[in-house]
Amino acid sequence: MSPGLGGTTGPRAFRRRRRAVGLLSAGLLVAGLPAVGMLAGCESRRQAPSRPLVIKIGTVLPESHPTAAALKVFRERIEALSGGTMTAHLFFSSALGDADEVIELCRMGDVEMAQVSAANLSVYAPLANALAMPFIWSGPEHQFRALDGEVGRIIREHIAPLGLEVLGFFDAGTRNISTRKGPILAPADLAGMKIRVMNAPLMVAAIDALGGSAVAMNQGEVFTALQMGVIDGWENNPMTVATFRMYETGCIHFAWTRHFSIPDCLVAGRPFLGRLTDAQRGWVTQAAVDTVAAQRRMWRESEEKALEQMRAGGMQFNEVRAELFRQRVRGIYDEYARRYGEEFRALCDLIASLRDDAPATGEGS
């Protein structure tokens, strides 16, 4: 059983369930359903106008981040498509919990939708690790071609039995290493450095292989950890670095390792989807399609602005000896193929075959 599949029992799950019940109650209040109204007589209820179905959507990102801001497009589109009978309430900056928590809330039916990384889903669905393998993508066009086609279909089918449905894949750029000391030019420069990663085993393994010492940590803890020197650096895309103003922690050395290009996902809980009519389900699907298109456009437009902000904040950029980094992760492909079998290897091969240069699996980009 993968780590995420055992997460619905025990004290931690009980605490999450209690938290979810509180959030659900809060969502009802926000939606305009105060307790006093619920206790009103039958006549009052008949006279009250029908209220829209509320979709709660959680993200760890702040509202200013383009991926989080794109969720407003979903709200606009679901309201337009449904004629105002459906709406969305957006919860930014981990207001509903971290990524792992909001995934569980969606699976339980306490939250309807979430924006999370494919790396978070890989804890529950090992095949999703293929999307996060180091250096597997040659660029955004390659990634979109795969995720909007057969690769995306395979991932959706793999995740569906977990109580989740992937409605779309967002652009999340390339992940690179930022450190307090630098520059980082080769794997040897990372020796002894504690580098924060998301709570995903593959990301831990990759950073360790690249020469650093990976530390799994929730996003909300990273800024303070960098300030206090608990960690020496972290890895993420330029957009997120700028959004959280990480250069203010003294973490100013940005190395273009481009080791990951892990897509974000817009997911919905199957308990929520199961309550919808065919028409409502169609509106949700179309709103998601429109949101994905908008997010990818917003990402391109915002990334250069993020780089300008980072430069103004004092960040120093450098290219790396890329081949030395690629060589260090080749063993991870063999390890994960042994661990997850031919289905995983075949998916990595399929992704590689969709590249313009079609390299051998594990060769990197």
Image (cartoon, rainbow, N blue to C red):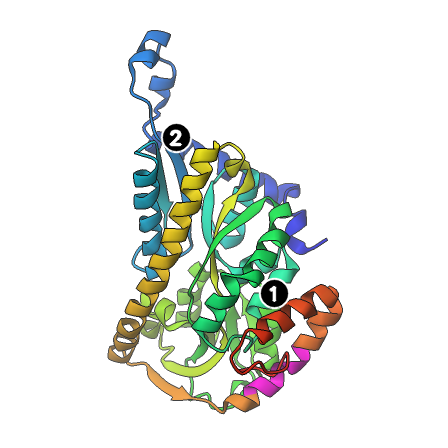
The answer to whether residue 40 is above or below residue 352 is above
User: Quick check: is 341 in the magenta stretch?
Assistant: no
Residue found 51% across the figure and 90% down from its top: 186
Secondary structure, mark 1, is helix
Q: What residue would you read off at disc 2? A: 28
Looking at the picture, which amino acid does disc 1 mark? Answer: Asn
The answer to whether residue 48 is above or below residue 27 is above
Q: Image quarter for residue 52?
A: top left
* Depth order, front residue of 273/312: 273
Magenta stretch, main secondary structure, is helix
- Residue 129's tag is 1
Looking at the picture, which amino acid does disc 2 mark? Answer: Leu
- Between the C-alphas of marks 1 and 2, the distance is 36 Å
Magenta residues (range): 325-332
* Depth order, front residue of 205/173: 173
Mark 1 closeness class: few <14, some 14–19, many ≥20 residues within 10 Å? many
Instruction: Evaluate whether residue 229 shows in this view.
Output: no
